[in-house]
Image: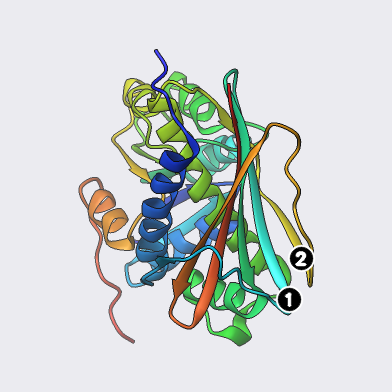
Amino acid sequence: MNQTVQLPAVCEFMSRHLADVFDTMLSLKAGLVAPTDLPHYEERVTGAVGFAGPTVTGAVYLHLSAPFAKVMATTMLGLAPEELSGEAEVNDVVGEATNMLTGGLKSWLCDCGYDCAVSTPAIIRGASFVIEPTMEVEREWLVFECGAERVVVEIHIKLN
Amino acid sequence: MAIKILSVDDSRTIRLIVGKTFRPYDVQIIEAANGEEGLVKAAQEKPDLIILDVTMPVMDGVTMLTKLKEDPNLKAIPVIMLTAESGRENVLQIARLGVRDYLVKPFKEDQLIEKAGRIVTLEKKVAA
């Protein structure tokens, strides 16, 4: 039996979950700030993981500045910056972090009666791009302050 | 003799984190990127413990674990499952498979050490 889930509840879950993932994997505190303050990154690294089931579809995008993505990789892997083998290693870490975020959301949705499966992570790199939702898909941005950095989680979701 | 731990995960990040977690201990880490590779490495290396991801391409963790339990030479190897999904159904399914323990991602390194330490004896490396 599905509980009625709406976008604000999804966002509330994701706010808590991102703080948990960042605290656990990076020992970093991440706090939600006003979504009007969408950051502009000179170079952006975005992790993307989709989810789909009979009554819910969507995707989670984790937007980071390229320098912060590198910090995340070195912290999670316990490496010095010069030990990173390149963008592939950073991409893998950002993909895994996005996977953890979406995996948590998937579990929460399943517990609410919205069975779904998640995709493998993909990475988008670029200076300026916008991800447009398709028709009937709701979108929300969650902006987090993490030290001096801004991290954005973009949620696209369609609940049937 | 070093404890052998087989880390089976399609994410190189997670395999590196597992390696980093056990670095202070007298542990040899063996890696595999999916269940199929994991079964081959398990048969070759006879690890003392397997840390196994659930969702992987080629062969997932559930299938690998099922095959492991069917093999008389491998079925006694203890397994800790790693999963990014903490939902009730997922956890129940994992529990039914006969794993020794499970850990939900994200996890603290201390949690993995604690769970592994309940199964194998972890000894700190002696400084040279």
Q: Is residue B18 visible?
A: yes
The answer to whether residue B83 is visible is no
Circle 1 SS class: loop
Q: Which residue is mark 2?
A: A125
Q: Nearer the viewer, residue B111 or A141?
A: A141
Can you give x and y, in whole percent of width and height, for residue B46 in the image?
A: 45, 42
Q: Residue A135's x, y, as percent?
A: 75, 33
Q: CA distance from mark 2 to mark 1?
A: 7 Å
Q: Quadrant of residue B85?
A: top left
Tell me the residue that label 1 is attached to.
A43
Residue drawn where x is 68% and y is 76% of the image:
A41
Callout 2: SS: strand
Mark sitting earlier along the chain (2/1): 1
The N terminus of chain A, quarter of image: top left
Image: B73 above or below A1: below
Extreme-top residue of the structure: A1
* Position of A86 relative to B79 (above/below): below
The residue positioned 36% from the left and 54% from the top of the image is B107
Q: Amino acid at mark 2?
A: Arg
Which class describes the residues within 10 Å of circle 2: few (<14), some (14-19), or many (20+)? Answer: some
Number of residues whose C-alpha sits closer than 10 Å to that of mark 1, classed few (under 14), some (14–19) or many (20 or more): few
Q: Residue furthest left?
A: B118
In the rendered structure, are the residues bearing label 2 and label 1 in contact, judged by CB atoms less than 8 Å apart?
yes
Do marks 2 and 1 share a chain? yes
The answer to whether A135 appears left or right of A89 in the picture is right
Residues A31 and B66: in front is A31
Q: Residue at x 73, y 76 (%)?
A: A43
A21 or B22, nearer to the observer: A21
Q: Which amino acid lies under the numbered mark 1 shown in the image of this protein?
A: Glu
The chain that hosts pointer 2 is A
Q: Chain of mark 1?
A: A
